[in-house]
Amino acid sequence: MEAAAIMRVQTKHYPKNCLLTVMDRYSAVVRNMEQVVMIPSLLRDMQFNVHGHRAQDGAPDLYNYFTMLKAIRVDVDHGLLPREEWRSKVADGRASEAENEAAKTEKDEEERILGQLDLEAQFHLHFSSLHHILTHLTLKAEEVTRTYQEIMGQAK
């Protein structure tokens, strides 16, 4: 197989809209991205082009997306860190002060909303949100891979 070839993404067979299908596809696409992107530093200061337009100033570069997508894949494949480990990771400065404040505000708003919903409604809210987010992140991983291939002259 030549270097320019895209690895075929293998996934297990679940119903199309099953969360397990979305999780498997995400993991497979990110693993493919990790195999294709041999020099991640080339992604620094590169922005996504959205419908022919450059991303807004201050938007994360492709390298930040690359590292975030890899970290999320580990969580998808192996489960979440225990809450105490996650909090210590945040306390170690791996999350910015703005992220912490946004997370607190988001958590407060979520608790307010969830307090008004029954458990089934809460489940559907989180389930559909997770499905949507993983689908969106899968598309981002595909775009990082495609952009890297263009940089390296491997685009189809």
Image (cartoon, rainbow, N blue to C red):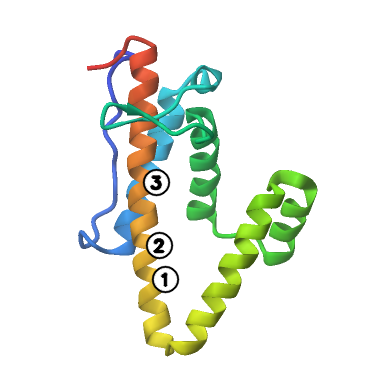
Q: For mark 1, what is the residue?
A: 126
Amino acid carrying label 1: it is His
Amino acid carrying label 2: it is Leu
Residue 137 lies, with reference to residue 106, above or below; the image says: above
Q: Residues within 10 Å of mark 2 (few under 14, many from 20)?
A: some
Q: Quadrant of the N terminus?
A: top left
Q: Residues within 10 Å of mark 3 (few under 14, many from 20)?
A: some
The foreground one among 47 and 36 is 47
Q: Residue at x 40, y 20 (%)?
A: 148
Q: Is residue 110 left or right of residue 102?
A: left
Tell me if label 1 and label 2 are in contact, CB under 8 Å.
Answer: yes
Mark with earlier residue (2, 3): 2
Tell me if label 2 and label 3 are in contact, CB under 8 Å.
Answer: no
Amino acid carrying label 3: it is Leu
CA distance separating discs 1 and 2? 6 Å
- The answer to which image quadrant residue 35 occupies is top left
Residue 126 lies, with reference to residue 100, above or below; the image says: below
Q: For mark 3, what is the residue?
A: 137
Q: For mark 2, what is the residue?
A: 130
The foreground one among 79 and 71 is 71
- Local secondary structure at mark 3: helix
> How far from the left and from the top, in percent, is residue 117?
43, 87
- Local secondary structure at mark 1: helix
